[in-house]
């Protein structure tokens, strides 16, 4: 089915991921011509990438062939066969794949990334080591696009780990670990575990935690490879005997869940979610990139790719074979959404609140994708579309939120929301933009967040059965989400100015609006979330849905998509009501300030207990350190001192000592006294004679 | 008539090593260029042989006198053969040897001047920071001119080379050539006796290199190294002699007709042969508990030699296991494959955990090498084409990455006055940016990061294990579990790799390191070259995979290969 073109238009899909990587390398070379040249090359790379991704959607191969049901799997570029690894036993193509899912994601990733790059121009101004920064940013984007475009698991894994490395390096960008770059508050501990992390520590934590997920992922794909002898997505769908073989060994669902483990790590889902809040030690532009455009979306994309493959592959084994897999995805998504939202309600660090909110929102996406598999096969596209619609919508508003937060932190010289306050007059543009994106997060109509979140909840409601539980969890989380988004806005912009700001102003620091390179990107994002929100019910959600249902049809999942306001009315109105309720509570507490949050927390030991439980991250982080990190680091030293040095190394001393002991013993009899030798000789003869007689060698 | 290509690659360095000695006596450290050119020539010969896929070269010595006995006369048939399996090993060895030859110049200058008491190696910290421990290497009678400024950094007065130091350089480079050729001979051998000969041949010069130029209790440590590996080699020889008597020939590659069946018939002897060879070679591979010589030898050897010992030499044990056991004893081998895999698994974890507990940077790398040998052992243990190929590839990956790391450790030793304790490092990425980048690449290679060759080898190894799991049967479940554990050990590798990276290169720069700089291209160029190779082979793994699989697919491993 591979589709090869004689023209070179099959070069463009390859360029989508290659441009940022090549451009990143070029920006390093351009640094030789000065900082401006380097910055322009880096930003231009972002722009060209976005243009290439856009061009992809306009190519006839996409508009007519792919959307007409063809599979555009590119294994030739300009007539050159793209073999990556060729051996007598197997061949792995370095191919890229263009389908509606990759196209939509490539578009989202590249444009949001471009805006973040523009924002970096202002945000990172005056920093040192920016060559490294811009290279890694573009390399990051390139690897993410490689994940999106690759046509097989092994190539995907290349991008997958590339993204992991870039996040590590960028989170730890300020690698001198000066105190001002630390995340968390010094001196605060949870059950004896410090809550503050240096940038390099946070980067390391991110890499190792996601790596644990990646290991599960690798085991999963190698298991499939062991049975299917291929990594190619479409080959796996076309010949599904591997699935029945795997199922016969009882490994089909475990393999799927192992692959999902990779998504759990990258997308910061429970139980591997703890790295993301501490990843806030990196520059804010990096946080925006990780949370909106690249890293965390990779996991969602993976589930979106793997889910249908497993569904189709297991179709012949009877329905419900993959139920445990989809139920796991949905359950982890729902639980993570709740877990993270609860923490976002109580934290004071602006970026940490946003980080928890990302974890929570990704949980929603997982919930949507999981529900897709739990519902009737014909309804698969509902949850699927909802999950990816929310991904797009989250990318827009979360990038916007982070960019606003970056400026706020810069101008107030504090990472704590409580040290801001009363900023709505000075920072009008930021205030309006942040209000819009926060309302989108809160799920307030007509912003995109309202429609996409509702699409997920609606899908869960419609699926029924076990999904009803997920729906209820989702609704509770939605209430929390609305509350914490407006809480953040209220603390930062409403009320009086904090002491910190008054001190700054007393010192002559003027609180002023961001430069154009910074506010323009986040205003664009706020505008986008509004425009998409307005267009969604009119045609956007429907066309997105039909696009994805074409994607699913290519794989073999027949599931037409239809959206109409009437049938959604129930879930839409519940969603609206919940959002308004959450916003209203936050309004009373943080904008009108007629309820004192402190008084509420102190009013009852139960609320106080919950408050602390949430503040201490449900003690999960502390648990990991106490049960895994500390025992390993102490244990290795213990083994080294007590086993390696006391049991194994003494062999080196023991062996020669044994030898010298033996020789010492033997030396004793060499006395040199003739009488003794004669005596020993006599005894020996006597003994020999006795032995000979005893054993009958000599007979008389 | 076979072109004498490979025999040149092995014998030219040996024949020219006296020349290196005389040139060294005359020109001192500059004679490194001679060593470099000789090794480069041999490397090019290998590349030529590889690109022309030459047939095995065979040479006969004293055949007539022993014509009566086929076994004894076969001792005289000395061959050299470069096929898909020996290719990755051979090229890695010579490429690293060639690169490290140049690297040796500044390092050995530092070391020899230090040994001759021409420069004192002092790291004086400012009063408020903890007094760094001086390495044990300082000779008692120091006479060199060192000024220690108030801020605490040591200034090195660069001494000039004299007759005495020239002799030391001469000795070093002569031994260096012998050592390199010894490793090469081992890998290219086609005769068991020849193999044993070269196996011991590489031991002697390396023993002297450690004994003469090493650190700490170098006399004792080099002796320990010699004894352990020699006893291992003798065990291996016992196995070889038995194989020879059973098959009536010592030629093993290509396997003589009937040898496999003759061996398979000798059921009583097989366990002993396998035991002798496995234990003998696992000493070289440093599989716990046979590893104890390695941390000492690798840590206290002069660093360029550490960069040959660890990346190039120890993995040769794996090569011989692949060659002898899978070629000659395929069925017996498959009875013990799971045991080997489990031993490999233990090696991975044990080495990794011990690496976490180290403070001496070279010792840390030494334990990390043990852990990496675990991957090779595991790959061989899977007894699948994928796993065995992965093991051979892993030799390459570990070689390039670990050579870079040892060379960087050596650069820090030279530039920071003998500093080896990680506790006293930190923030070096501002002073050593190129090293920081190369160290990152090398560490990523170790932890199996895609886009480096480490991933390309490790996924093959793990895929081999999971292929065994896929075959089902009673052992399928066990294979599944041990394969997952093997993949999981890469998390442990990530932990020590990134943690070391953080402690050495990130954080605050201590005052006593404020004057450190990267210095000469002699050191940087080999580091950059091998780091680039790490990425190149990660992006284009076909360079290794192509010839490797071509040969491995033909191995008599009876398990089903991939279609």
Image (tube, coloured by chain):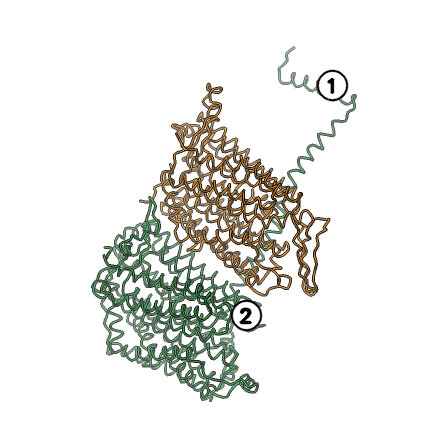
Q: Position of residue B115 (x, y in %)?
A: 67, 47
Q: Residue at x 49, y 36 (%)?
A: B10
Q: Sequence-wise, which precedes: disc 1 or disc 2?
A: 2
Q: Which mark is residue A682?
A: 1
Closest to the camera, between mark 1 and mark 2, is 2
Q: Secondary structure at mark 2?
A: loop
Q: Which subunit holds the residue at mark 1?
A: A
| Residue at far top of view | A700
- A342 or A25, nearer to the observer: A25
Q: Secondary structure at mark 1?
A: helix
Q: Position of residue A473 (x, y in %)?
A: 38, 72
Tint of chain A: green
Q: Which mark is residue B513?
A: none
Q: For label 1, count other residues whose C-alpha is less than 10 Å away and answer few (under 14), some (14-19) or many (20+).
A: few
Quick one: quadrant of the C terminus of chain A?
Answer: top right
Q: Is residue A305 above or below residue B95?
A: below
Q: Are marks 1 and 2 on the same chain?
A: yes
Q: Position of residue A552 (x, y in %)?
A: 26, 63
Q: Report which quarter residue B34 is drawn in.
A: top right
Camera sees residue A50: yes
Q: Is residue A293 above or below residue B49?
A: below
Q: Which chain is orange?
A: B
- Distance of label 1 from label 2 (alpha carbons): 84 Å
Residue B87 horizontal side relative to residue A48, left or right? right
| Residue at far front of view | B26
- B344 or A168, nearer to the observer: A168
Q: Is residue A602 above or below residue A243?
A: below
- A699 or B188, nearer to the observer: B188
Camera sees residue B489: no
Q: Which subunit holds the residue at mark 2?
A: A
Report which residue position mark 2 lands on. A196
């Amino acid at each position: 089915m591979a589709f090869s073109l004689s023209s070179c238009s099959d070069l463009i899909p390859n360029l989508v991921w290659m441009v940022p990587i090549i451009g990143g390398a070029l920006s390093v070379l351009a640094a030789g011509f000065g900082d401006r040249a380097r910055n322009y090359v880096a930003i231009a790379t972002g722009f060209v990438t976005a243009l290439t991704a856009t061009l992809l959607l306009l190519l006839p191969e996409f508009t007519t062939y792919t959307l007409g049901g063809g599979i555009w799997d590119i294994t030739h570029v300009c007539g050159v066969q793209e073999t990556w690894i060729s051996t007598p036993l197997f061949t792995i193509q370095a191919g890229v794949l263009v389908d509606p899912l990759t196209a939509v994601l490539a578009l989202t990733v590249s444009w949001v990334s471009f805006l973040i790059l523009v924002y970096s121009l202002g945000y990172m101004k005056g920093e040192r080591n920016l060559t490294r920064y811009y290279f890694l940013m573009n390399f990051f984007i390139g690897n993410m696009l490689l994940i999106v475009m690759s046509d097989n698991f092994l190539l995907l894994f290349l991008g997958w780990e590339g993204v992991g490395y870039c996040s590590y390096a960028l989170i730890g960008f300020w690698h001198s670990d000066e105190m001002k770059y630390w995340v968390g508050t010094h001196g605060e501990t949870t059950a004896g575990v410090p809550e503050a992390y240096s940038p390099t520590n946070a980067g390391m934590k991110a890499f190792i935690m996601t790596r644990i997920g990646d290991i599960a992922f690798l085991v999963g794909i190698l298991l499939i490879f062991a049975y299917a002898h291929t990594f190619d997505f479409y080959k796996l769908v076309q010949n599904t005997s591997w699935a029945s073989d795997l199922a016969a060994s009882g490994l089909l669902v475990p393999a799927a869940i192992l692959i999902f483990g990779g998504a759990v790590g990258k997308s910061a889902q429970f139980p591997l979610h703890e790295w993301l809040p501490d990843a806030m030690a990196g520059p804010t532009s990096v946080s925006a990139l990780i949370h909106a455009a690249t890293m965390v979306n990779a996991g969602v994309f993976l589930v979106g790719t793997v889910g249908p493959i497993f569904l189709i592959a297991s179709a012949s084994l009877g329905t419900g074979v993959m139920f445990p897999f989809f139920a796991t995805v949905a359950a982890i998504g729902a639980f993570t959404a709740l877990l993270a939202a609860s923490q976002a309600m109580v934290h004071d660090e602006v970026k940490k609140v946003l980080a928890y909110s990302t974890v929570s929102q990704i949980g929603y996406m997982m919930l949507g994708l999981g529900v897709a598999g739990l519902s009737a096969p014909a309804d698969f596209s509902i949850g699927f579309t909802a999950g990816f619609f929310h991904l797009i919508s989250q990318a827009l508003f979360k990038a916007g939120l982070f960019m606003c937060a970056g400026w706020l932190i810069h101008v107030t010289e504090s990472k704590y929301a409580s040290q801001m306050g009363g900023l709505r007059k000075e920072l009008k543009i930021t205030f309006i933009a942040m209000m819009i994106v926060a309302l989108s997060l809160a799920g307030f109509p007509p912003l995109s967040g309202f429609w996409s979140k509702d699409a997920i909840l609606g899908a869960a409601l419609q699926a029924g059965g076990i999904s009803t539980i997920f729906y209820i969890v989702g609704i509770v989380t939605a209430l929390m989400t609305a509350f914490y988004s407006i809480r953040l806005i209220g603390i930062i912009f409403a009320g009086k100015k904090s002491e910190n700001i008054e001190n700054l102003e007393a010192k002559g620091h003027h609180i002023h609006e961001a430069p154009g390179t910074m506010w323009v990107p986040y205003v664009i994002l706020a505008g986008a979330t509004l425009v998409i929100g307005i267009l969604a019910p009119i045609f956007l959600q429907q066309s997105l849905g039909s696009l994805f249902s074409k994607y699913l049809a290519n794989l073999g999942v027949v599931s037409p998509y239809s959206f109409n306001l009437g049938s959604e009315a129930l879930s839409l109105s519940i969603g609206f009501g919940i959002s308004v309720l959450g916003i209203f509570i936050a309004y009373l507490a943080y904008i009108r300030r007629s309820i004192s949050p402190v008084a509420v927390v102190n009013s009852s030991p139960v609320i106080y207990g919950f408050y602390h439980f949430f503040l201490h991250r449900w003690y999960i982080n502390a648990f990991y350190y106490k049960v895994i990190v500390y025992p390993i680091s102490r244990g290795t030293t213990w083994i080294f001192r007590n086993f390696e040095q006391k049991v194994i190394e003494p062999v080196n001393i023991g062996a020669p000592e044994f030898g010298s002991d033996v020789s010492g013993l033997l030396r004793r009899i060499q006395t040199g006294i003739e009488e003794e030798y004669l005596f020993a000789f006599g005894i020996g003869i006597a003994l020999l004679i006795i032995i000979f007689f005893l054993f009958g060698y000599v007979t008389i | 008539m076979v072109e004498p290509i490979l025999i040149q690659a092995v014998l030219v360095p040996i024949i020219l090593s006296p020349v290196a000695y005389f040139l060294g006596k005359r020109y001192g450290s500059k004679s490194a260029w001679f060593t470099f050119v000789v090794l480069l020539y041999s490397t090019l010969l290998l590349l030529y042989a590889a690109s022309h896929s030459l047939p095995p070269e065979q040479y006969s010595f004293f055949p007539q006198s022993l014509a009566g006995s086929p076994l004894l006369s076969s001792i005289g048939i000395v061959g050299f053969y470069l096929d898909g399996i020996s290719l990755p090993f051979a090229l890695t060895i010579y490429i690293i040897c060639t690169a490290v030859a140049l690297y040796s110049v500044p390092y050995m200058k530092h070391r020899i001047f230090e040994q001759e008491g021409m420069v004192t190696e002092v790291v004086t910290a400012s009063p408020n920071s903890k007094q760094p421990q001086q390495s044990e290497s300082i000779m008692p009678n120091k006479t060199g001119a060192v000024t220690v400024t108030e801020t605490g950094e040591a200034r090195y007065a660069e001494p000039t080379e004299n007759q005495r130091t020239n002799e030391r350089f001469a000795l070093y480079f002569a031994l260096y050539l012998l050592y390199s050729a010894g490793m090469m001979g081992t890998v290219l051998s086609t005769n068991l006796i020849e193999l044993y000969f070269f196996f011991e041949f590489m031991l002697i010069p390396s023993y002297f290199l450690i004994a003469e130029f090493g650190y700490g209790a170098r006399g004792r440590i080099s002796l320990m190294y010699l004894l352990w590996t020699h006893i291992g080699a003798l065990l291996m020889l016992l196995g070889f002699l038995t194989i020879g008597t059973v098959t009536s020939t010592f030629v093993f590659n290509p396997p003589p007709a009937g040898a496999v069946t003759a061996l398979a018939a000798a059921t009583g002897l097989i366990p002993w042969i396998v035991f002798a060879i496995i234990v003998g070679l696992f000493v070289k591979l440093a599989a716990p508990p046979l590893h104890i010589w390695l941390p000492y030898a690798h840590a206290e050897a002069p660093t360029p030699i550490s960069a040959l010992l660890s990346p190039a030499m120890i993995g040769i044990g794996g090569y011989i296991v692949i060659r002898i056991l899978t070629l000659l004893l395929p069925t017996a081998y498959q009875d013990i494959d799971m045991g080997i895999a489990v031993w490999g698994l233990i090696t991975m974890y044990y080495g990794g955990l011990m690496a976490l507990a180290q403070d001496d940077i070279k010792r840390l790398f030494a334990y990390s090498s043990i852990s990496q040998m675990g991957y090779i052992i595991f790959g061989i243990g899977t007894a699948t084409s994928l796993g065995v190929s992965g093991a051979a590839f892993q030799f390459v990956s570990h070689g390039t990455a670990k050579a870079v790391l040892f060379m960087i450790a050596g650069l820090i030793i030279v530039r920071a006055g003998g500093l080896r304790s990680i506790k006293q490092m930190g923030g070096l990425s501002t002073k050593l940016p190129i090293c920081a980048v190369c160290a990152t690449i090398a560490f990523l290679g170790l932890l199996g990061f895609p886009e480096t060759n480490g991933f390309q080898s490790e996924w093959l190894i793990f895929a081999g294990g999971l292929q065994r799991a896929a075959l089902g049967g009673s052992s399928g479940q066990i294979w599944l579990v041990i394969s997952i554990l093997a993949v999981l050990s890469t998390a442990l590798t990530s932990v020590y790799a990134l943690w070391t990276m953080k402690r050495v290169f990130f954080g605050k720069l201590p005052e006593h390191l404020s004057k450190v700089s990267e210095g000469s291209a002699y050191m940087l160029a080999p580091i950059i070259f091998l780091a680039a190779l790490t990425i190149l082979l990660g992006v284009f793994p076909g360079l290794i995979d192509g010839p490797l699989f071509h040969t491995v697919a033909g191995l008599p491993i009876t398990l089903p290969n991939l279609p």
